[in-house]
Amino acid sequence: MIIDTHCHFDMMPNPEQYLKQQEVKKNISIGMTNLPSHFLLGYEHVRQYKFSRLALGFHPLYASENKSELRLFNQCLDKTSYIGEIGLDFSNEGLKTKDDQVFVLEKVLQLLSKKNKIVSVHSRRAEKVLFEMLVTYGIKNVIFHWYSGPLSLIPKIVEHGYYFSINEKMTKTNSGIEIIKRIPHNLILTETDAPFNKICSISNTLTNIGLGENAIYDNFSRLISAIRR
């Protein structure tokens, strides 16, 4: 069984065809959304499937222009066990909206602090700030999607029991390899970030990091158990 904890099937050319293929293969797919309104658009379409789930998201690069959707985020919160993609982006692309991103994320984390969800986070160039906010609000069951931050922060993330989702592209760069080396096997999950990431075979990812499908299944099952307590 292939487990993709971070993809964007709502952005694929034919989401329905993709979801049907995943059902036949019995592969698990967690689809991120960029805004609560996007989640609502896809919710009824996805809920019929056994192996795919839609996550409620508020992407940091969408935060500045869509603060009015915070109310909708709250209204949708009990419709899913999965949250994503949320977080911060302080790259050149996102730096100009830094304050708005932090404002929106604080509101989102306040809501999540009262819930028990699985949370996939975007942390580009904002890893330390994001980590500290997650800890401040007591957020559990976090998955750091495509982590590219400082190696020195990884032990702190690990100490809090947070997971990392790894894709094939990470296994092909020196920086990605150094990151993966420092992550305990019991905190590794797999992702594609499709359709944006084109180098995204999960089978290749597993081969490259020396883990089998069963190891990822066990890690994911542990995460699922955590939200059912």
Image (spheres, grey):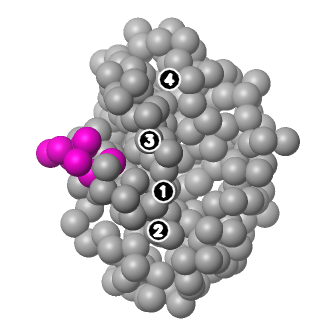
Whole-number angstrom distance, CA of label 4 to CA of label 1: 29 Å
Q: Position of residue 8 (x, y in %)?
A: 33, 46
Label 2: element kind: loop
Which span is picked out in magenta?
12-19
Whole-number angstrom distance, CA of label 3 to CA of label 2: 16 Å
Foreground: 121 or 213? 213
Q: Nearer the viewer, mark 4 or mark 3?
A: 3
Relative height, residue 172 to residue 12 (above, below): below
Residue where numbered disc 3 is placed = 49
Point out the image quarter for the C terminus. top right
Q: Are marks 2 and 1 in contact (CB under 8 Å)?
A: yes
- Residue at 46% x, 68% y: name it: 2
User: Within 10 angstroms of label 1, few (less than 14), some, or many (20 or more) residues?
Assistant: some
Residue where numbered disc 2 is placed = 2
Relative height, residue 100 to residue 53 (above, below): above
Q: Position of residue 42 (x, y in %)?
A: 34, 28
Name, please, the residue furthest toward the front. Answer: 24
Q: Which mark is residue 152?
A: none
Please say whether residue 145 is visible from this viewpoint: no
Name, please, the residue furthest toward the right. Answer: 229
Residue where numbered disc 4 is placed = 104
Q: Are marks 2 and 4 in contact (CB under 8 Å)?
A: no
* Amino acid tagged 2: Ile
Position of residue 150 in the picture relative to residue 33 (left or right): right
Label 1: element kind: strand
Whole-number angstrom distance, CA of label 4 to CA of label 3: 31 Å
Q: Nearer the viewer, mark 3 or mark 1?
A: 3
Q: Nearer the viewer, mark 2 or mark 4?
A: 2
Dot 3 or dot 2, earlier in sequence: 2
Dominant SS of magenta comes to helix
Residue where numbered disc 1 is placed = 28
Dot 2 or dot 4, earlier in sequence: 2
